[in-house]
Amino acid sequence: MTQPTRPTPELLAELRKPRPYPAVSVTLPTHRHWPESQQDHIRLRNLLTEAEKRLGEDPEVSKATASAVSQQLAAAADALDPEYFGDGLVVYASPEEHRSFLVGGSVPERIVINTTYLTRNLVALAAREREYLVLVLSTGEVRLWRGRGEEVTEDVDSGYPVITSGAERDGAPSRDGGQWASQDFRNMLAKADRKLTAVLQGNRLPVVLVGLPQQVAAYREVSHHGQALAAELESGGLLNTTPAEMSAQLAPVRQALAEADTARAMRGLDEARSGKRYSAGVQDVWQAAWEGRVALLVVEEGLRVTARPETVEGAERATLTLQAPGEESSPGMEDDIIDSVVETVLSADGEVIFVPDESLADAHGIAAALRY
């Protein structure tokens, strides 16, 4: 059994490309821990069986194509190890391929058959699993860790750890009553900060400082990367920490970074509103995205809207017909138009930030800062 692939930006761009109908997307909420996780593989099989039934009943899908996709869905299930499911699972299948992804956040139970894969859950996952750097400060050395979501590894290839020249004499009295040791410590921090310059070259990664309050304060005084210093963790004695232990220690930091993203998104919308570059509601935002004007799209994680987009070649506007509650789906209806909005914005080099539900209640769950 193999583990699902991690969604890189390049892979996400490839997955967003249109495909011949039918491209099947299956999402399933799962469990990390036993005994609840024992039922996940059965629930997945049942959901895939339902997807196969829909393919068999779809007049636009030939028997040969339905059989090919069904085989890909079965291969996807066979390749997964139910012992290692996360909070959610995303499976894609077409006649020629299948892909599987573990999702670190909640997903709905859904089957979508379209000409594109449903990628919004992976976009949200990529945002939650963005890369970050961790500088672990101590009296005698500075270590660098790299994180992506919950996974962290120590970096020993970028000039770290940086060790003070007086580390071996730590605790011994100095001739000037301790001032020499203090200056040596600051020199070490300055050297670590210089090495950080090369690490950040071309990468706008947030940096987390871990150490005692006086150590963190001293680093901030000497650092030339103040804008990159995104969070702090007050903790000592982490020099010999295992990756699993470090990840657990950094849990509140990851939450703080997510909250900072939400706050940044809201500031961006406020600035857009003041500058009259603001759009809210799915119909207006969809129109702006279709025109390529969205610089920042902010969406509540749980928002789902079924609608039928209609565009006329050469027309200045496009229309979006929303499905009324309880109304049966009609031809051309997209199960979740939000996914199309997300893909359109990303294809035009816009930024997408997902925020907790109810964060955009006044905008009906979706809003955008426009380029013009």
Image (tube, rainbow, N blue to C red):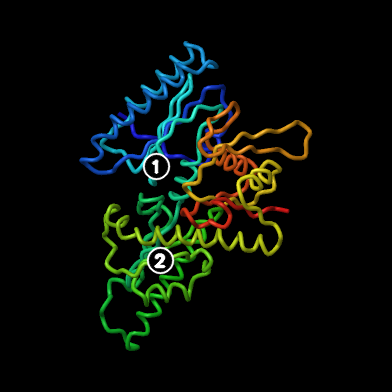
- Would you place residue 284 above or below residue 268 in this image? above
Query: Please, which residue is most extreme toward the left here?
Result: 35
Of helix, strand and loop, which one carries label 2?
Answer: strand
Q: Residue at x 43, y 26 (%)?
A: 98
Label for residue 364? none
The answer to whether residue 163 of the structure is visible from this angle is no
Amino acid type, callout 2:
Leu
The percent position of residue 233, horizontal first and vertical second, equals 36, 67
- Would you place residue 226 above or below residue 41 in this image? below
According to the picture, the residue beneath numbered tag 1 turns out to be: 103
Q: How many numbered marks have been drawn onto this rendered protein structure?
A: 2
For the residue carrying disc 2, how many other residues have a C-alpha within 10 Å: few (<14), some (14-19), or many (20+)? many
For the residue carrying disc 1, how many other residues have a C-alpha within 10 Å: few (<14), some (14-19), or many (20+)? many
Amino acid type, callout 1:
Val
The percent position of residue 19, horizontal first and vertical second, equals 56, 25
In this view, the mark in front (1 or 2): 1
Examine the image and state in which quarter residue 231 appears. Answer: bottom left
Q: Quadrant of the N terminus?
A: top left
- Would you place residue 48 above or below residue 246 in this image? above
Task: Name the foreground residue: 335 vs 295.
Answer: 335
Q: CA gap, disc 1 to disc 2?
A: 27 Å
Examine the image and state in which quarter residue 165 appears. Answer: bottom left
The answer to whether residue 353 of the structure is visible from this angle is yes
- Compare marks 1 and 2 and give the one earlier in the sequence: 1
According to the picture, the residue beneath numbered tag 2 turns out to be: 209
Q: Are marks 1 and 2 in contact (CB under 8 Å)?
A: no
Of helix, strand and loop, which one carries label 1?
Answer: strand
